């Protein structure tokens, strides 16, 4: 009841309208339909009726109906009113200016696809696990409906925060007062003109002001009956105000669904808006992971010994690149899609979002000297300590000193690009059976402090996170012994990456393949009879996660297939050393001979 009063206080004065019962049947179509074409920059966007927009999205409506599991009458009574109110509120607005779902009607499609995948994922979840079976049976339909509503309204805040909608006469729509469809009918608008504001940190809690115009009060009463926790979790997932201590299943399902939907749309659209701009939506997940780690991980306690976080008078710093690696590991465990392939990509996303500030126009990485540190560390500086530490109570006390190190004017700065090149050369030399001693001045990998629970590991196969075959693993992994690389008759190699390959992995793999063209340095990969063998160390040397690279290559069907049940990791004895890696099919490498030959015999040697 308190929640209903809150909605009334926020200004909900509408009344529940019955949906058109003549539109109950929604055919299921496996094809993904796109709304009408149009551009806000070229004379505006033509508004459409709710029925017309629903007809454009009949395929996803049919899939939602199947995932809901009820009959046509129950679907029309319980689900369609919510969907139609959402369509009436956003009408044909795009979700973004030039990134994901940028076409007219994109915001409707984004909400419906996110809601569908979140609803579909509820089949494998247990809600109210501590309750009795009979209680869970009564509450489960409400949890599923709340998950659908949270997914549908997950990006509703964009209407209130990032766009200004007007008609041809300059009259501006006020999204806090009425749905866009109602404003269109009242002012008889025939063209909508959309102006996009400057990029800034998103404020997802604004969605709560529009929610009363979408979620009927009787539905809210149904969700809150006998269990207010359902409404609380739904509102927290929509507003982004989820505490890490709360096991909010709704938020977890909606996050996974939204990243999947956006990742698919960007991949299909093959956007050229710029990698960092197109993937700017990931900034909030990176920031959320930082806030969770600083509350729950002992290695992230600010100013503690060997901490990832250091707070001084001159600001808050995150140790690079180990801090970013912790973030990516946490997000990978949550099953999110489209994650950055390396700490460098994550840093670029945070920089474009304004969450970190560079040291100068040429460098993003700072040098810091915490108290008790034997030497300086490299770190990223957060724009303000509160962006991460505001979730801590009480707030940590800053050190009574500046911890940033200002380099001498004649000192050559060590950038992350330089570090990647040095690590690549060192890894390539190690493959050839040699070891190149590091430079006298400590660099990125030398200046890192490992967490107490994570001892430092030498740069061997173990760095890839994939163990060599031993014991029980020997039966599943493919082993190849004493396999020497073959010479190529062609002198030029390049990567022919499929469109579906992760752009970050494709960029790194392209550099690995092109190392074959430089005869002055040892190569980072080796042509074999069955394909191109790429050691996992080659990805690690370029600060890319080997497991993530393996998954991306497997998803793109670029790896040479082995016996059923085997792992894609192979072990080859090259130059007296056993290396773990993957074999890329010859058809994806320009300049390879032996395309189409059978895979390497796993029992060879």
Image (cartoon, rainbow, N blue to C red):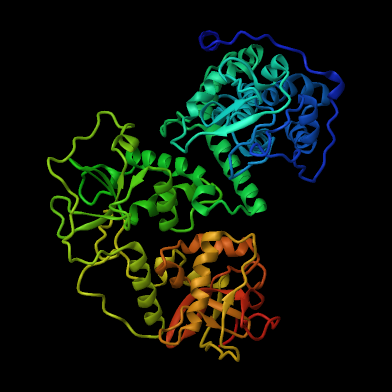
Q: Is residue 325 above or below residue 528?
A: above
Q: Residue furthest front?
A: 169
The C terminus - image quarter: bottom right
Q: Nearer the viewer, residue 583 or 80?
A: 80
Q: Nearer the viewer, residue 19 or 418?
A: 418
Q: How far across and how far down the image is residue 430, in percent?
A: 37, 80
Q: How far across and how far down the image is residue 215, in percent?
A: 63, 18
The N terminus - image quarter: top right
State how many labels appear.
0
Q: Nearer the viewer, residue 85 or 534?
A: 85
Quarter-of-image position of residue 459: bottom left
Q: Nearer the viewer, residue 357 or 312?
A: 357
* Relative side of 326 to 603, left or right: left
Q: How far across and how far down the image is residue 248, in percent?
A: 50, 31
**Residue 130 visible within the image:** no
Q: How far across and how far down the image is residue 554, in percent?
A: 61, 64
């Amino acid at each position: 009841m308190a929640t209903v009063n809150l909605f009334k206080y926020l200004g909900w004065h509408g009344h529940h309208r019955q949906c058109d019962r003549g539109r109950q049947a929604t055919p299921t179509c496996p094809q993904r339909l796109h709304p009408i074409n149009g551009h806000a920059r070229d004379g505006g966007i033509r508004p459409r009726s709710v029925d017309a927009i629903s007809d454009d999205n009949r395929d996803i409506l049919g899939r939602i109906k199947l995932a809901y599991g009820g009959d046509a009458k129950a679907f029309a009574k319980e689900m369609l009113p919510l969907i139609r109110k959402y369509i009436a509120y956003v009408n044909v607005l795009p979700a973004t200016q030039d990134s994901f779902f940028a076409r007219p009607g994109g915001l409707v499609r984004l909400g419906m696809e996110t809601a569908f995948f979140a609803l579909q994922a509820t089949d494998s979840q247990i809600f109210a696990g501590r309750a009795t079976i009979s209680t869970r049976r009564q509450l489960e339909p409400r949890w599923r409906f709340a998950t659908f509503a949270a997914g549908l309204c997950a990006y509703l805040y964009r209407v209130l925060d990032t766009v200004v909608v007007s008609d041809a006469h300059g009259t501006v729509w006020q999204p806090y007062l009425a749905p866009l469809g109602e404003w269109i009918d009242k002012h008889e608008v025939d063209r909508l003109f959309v102006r996009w504001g400057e990029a800034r940190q998103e404020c997802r809690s604004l969605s709560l002001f529009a929610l009363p115009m979408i979620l009927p009060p009787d539905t809210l009463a149904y969700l809150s009956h006998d269990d207010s926790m359902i409404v609380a979790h739904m509102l927290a997932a929509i507003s982004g105000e989820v505490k890490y201590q709360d096991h909010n299943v709704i938020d977890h399902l909606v996050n996974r669904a939204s990243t999947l939907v956006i990742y698919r749309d960007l991949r299909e659209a093959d956007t050229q808006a710029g990698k960092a701009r197109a993937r700017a939506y990931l900034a909030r997940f990176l920031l959320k992971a930082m806030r969770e780690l600083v509350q729950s991980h002992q290695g992230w306690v600010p100013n503690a010994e060997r901490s990832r976080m250091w707070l001084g008078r001159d600001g808050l710093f995150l140790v690079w690149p180990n801090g970013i690696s912790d973030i990516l590991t946490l997000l990978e465990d949550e099953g999110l899609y489209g994650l950055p392939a390396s700490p460098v990509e994550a840093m670029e996303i945070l920089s474009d979002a304004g969450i970190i500030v560079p040291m100068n126009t040429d460098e993003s990485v700072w040098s810091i000297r915490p108290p008790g540190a034997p030497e300086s560390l490299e770190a990223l500086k957060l724009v303000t300590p509160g962006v991460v530490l505001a979730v801590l109570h009480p707030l940590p006390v800053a050190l009574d000193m500046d911890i940033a190190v200002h380099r001498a004017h004649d000192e050559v700065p060590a950038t992350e690009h330089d570090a990647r090149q040095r690590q690549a050369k060192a890894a390539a030399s190690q493959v050839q059976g040699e070891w190149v001693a590091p430079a006298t001045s400590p660099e990125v990998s030398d200046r890192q402090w490992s967490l107490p629970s994570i001892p430092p590991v030498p740069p061997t196969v173990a760095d890839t996170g994939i163990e060599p075959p031993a014991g029980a693993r020997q039966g599943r992994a493919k082993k190849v012994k004493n396999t020497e690389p073959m010479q190529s008759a062609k002198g030029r190699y390049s990567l022919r990456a499929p469109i579906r390959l992760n752009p970050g992995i494709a960029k790194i793999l392209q550099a690995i393949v092109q190392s074959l063209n430089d005869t002055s340095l040892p190569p980072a990969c080796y042509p074999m009879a069955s394909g191109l063998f790429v050691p996992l160390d080659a990805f690690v040397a370029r600060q890319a996660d080997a497991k993530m690279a393996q998954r991306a290559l497997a998803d793109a069907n670029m790896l040479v297939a082995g016996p059923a049940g085997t792992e894609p990791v192979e072990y080859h004895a090259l130059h007296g050393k056993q290396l773990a890696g993957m074999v890329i099919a010859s058809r994806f490498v320009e300049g390879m001979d032996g395309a189409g030959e059978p895979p390497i015999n796993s029992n060879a040697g």
